[in-house]
Structures are given as C-alpha cells and as structure tokens.
C-alpha cells in the first residue's frame, strides 16, 4: 500500500501472476496515476489495470450504489487503451493497480500524485483516529466515510437541510421516509452496501452523540436527496483491546465477527 506521492517502478524477478498495489491519499485528495514506462506482454497474458476505488476479498469501496460510474467503467485496462490514457485520476482518495507480469525483467514505472478535492464524498481513513466534516452541497448522491478499525465515534454536529415538519410521521420506521439522513454501518468487509445498519440519524442536532462499534470496518454514510446542504462532523478513535473485551454503555459489538 502506498500513501506517499512519487515515482515507483515494479520489475518482475520471476513470473508475478496475482499482484495489486493499494493507493491512498488524504481524505480531501484525489489520486492520479501516470504511466511513465510500461513493458508488459499483453498478448502473452500480462495485464495492468487501474481500479477506481479498492477491492478486497471481492468487496468494493465505494459500493456500486455510491460510486458515480458503473463497475465496468471503473476498470481502466492498459492492454485495451495503451498510452492513450496515460494519466488516470480516481473519484475519491483511494485507487488500486492490478497487474500480472510473467516475463522476468518486464514491468512498469508510474508516478503517483494527489490533487485537492474540495468536496470529498467517499473516503477511506488512513488512520484509526481523526476528525472529519462530511459536506454534501445540493447533490443527489450518497457519501461514505470508512474507518477500517473498531472505533468509538462521537458525532458533534449534524445539519440536515429538511424541515422538521416534513420528516417521517412514524419515528419507528427509521429514516426511510426522509430523503436526507446519516447512517452508521458496521461489518467485516469493505462494501458499505453489505454492512449491518447500526443507527439512523434523521434529525439535525448539536452533539455529542457517541457510539462504540467493535467491527473491523465502520462507516458513516450520508444519504442526500440533492435538495439541501447536509453536513456531519465527527471524531473517531480506535477501540482499545480492553474496551472490546468489556463493552459497556452505548456500544455495538455482538453483530460483528471482529478479528481483534
């Protein structure tokens, strides 16, 4: 996994059949991959593909529901496009390179750089601790902030643009009748659409509201209708081992098959 910009070269010393490099920037950055030199045998079965997001154990981030492109368009295959697409920019702060190089001595050189993203939507956190404000300004899109650790999340501020009078008349129905809300998700994989919903937040408030989530992966996901400006500010820190062993208070752990 690479988190520093720069130029990187891969040269096969033996047949390398199933390889990948995971690229990650800061939350407010796009990742750009530029091909400097490519020496692979496409006809002989080699490949070099960039994926817009991450795939791990068959699960994608961002999920198909939350990414602006269909899955087939998120793969850019060098063997199809050659150097006509010399630079490829991700839609969020993560991307990855899949490659197979059979012939020793062959390989490729790429330059990885980052560009500012004024309104980051889908993010994987580089660190187990941090603070972030997710803003969705009048856009009909769903945005997920993923933390690949068991964490305590403290939401300090949630502003949803809809009026209280227009909210669901049946509070027990969750947020299904409201176009703008935030949900907390937990699970063991990467894809938010396959995670367990732990809490729905349908109403604006000034916190703090805190929850312990003992899952391998925790996601704060904002669903926006596009009619309003929605904003959520939260802090998170990794759970200590003793907190996982002795959960108390407002916590969710039993649904997660945590490996910690």
Image (cartoon, rainbow, N blue to C red):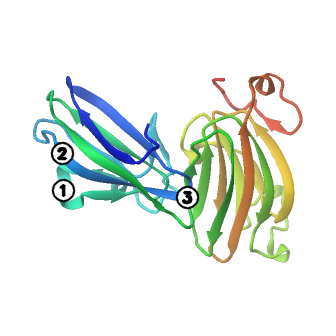
Marks 1 and 3 in Cβ contact (< 8 Å): no
**Residue 76 image offset from top left, x and y in percent:** 29, 53
Of residues 45 and 134, which is closer to you in this image?
Answer: 134
Farthest residue toward the front? 6
What residue is at 75 percent from the left and 60 percent from the top? 175
Q: Is residue 250 above or below residue 117?
A: above
Callout 2–callout 1 Cβ contact below 8 Å: yes
Relative to residue 97, is residue 204 depicted above or below?
A: below
Return the residue at label 2: 38
- State which quarter of the image contains the N terminus: top left
Q: Is residue 145 left or right of residue 89?
A: right
- Which of the 4 image quadrants contains residue 221? bottom right
- The residue located at (56%, 36%) in the rendering is 189
Expressed as whole percent of the image width and height from the top left, the position of residue 56 reads: 46, 37
Task: In the rendered view, tell whether residue 146 sits above or below residue 241.
Answer: below
Q: Secondary structure at mark 2?
A: strand
């Amino acid at each position: 996994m690479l988190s520093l910009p720069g130029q990187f070269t891969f040269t096969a010393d033996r047949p390398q059949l199933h390889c990948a490099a995971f690229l990650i920037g800061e939350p407010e950055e796009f990742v750009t991959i530029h091909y400097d030199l490519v020496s692979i045998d496409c006809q002989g079965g080699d490949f070099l593909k960039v994926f817009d997001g991450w795939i791990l154990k068959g699960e994608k981030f961002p999920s198909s529901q939350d990414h602006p492109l269909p899955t087939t368009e998120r793969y850019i295959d060098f063997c199809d496009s050659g150097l006509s697409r010399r630079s490829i920019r991700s839609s969020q702060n993560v991307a990855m390179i899949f490659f197979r190089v059979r012939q020793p001595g062959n390989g490729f050189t790429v330059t990885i750089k980052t560009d500012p993203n004024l309104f980051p939507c889908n993010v994987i956190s580089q660190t187990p601790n941090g603070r972030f404000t997710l803003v969705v300004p009048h856009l009909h899109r769903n945005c997920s902030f993923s933390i690949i650790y068991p964490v305590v999340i403290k939401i300090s501020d949630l502003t949803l643009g809809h009026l209280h009078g227009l909210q669901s008349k049946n509070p027990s129905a969750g947020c299904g009748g409201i176009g703008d809300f935030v949900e907390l998700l937990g699970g063991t994989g990467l894809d938010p659409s396959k995670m367990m919903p732990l809490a729905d937040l349908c109403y604006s408030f000034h916190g703090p509201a805190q929850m312990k989530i003992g899952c391998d992966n925790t996601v704060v996901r904002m669903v926006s209708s596009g009619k309003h400006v929605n904003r959520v500010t939260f802090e998170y820190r990794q759970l200590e081992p003793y907190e996982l062993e002795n959960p108390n208070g407002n916590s969710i752990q039993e649904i997660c098959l945590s490996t910690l």
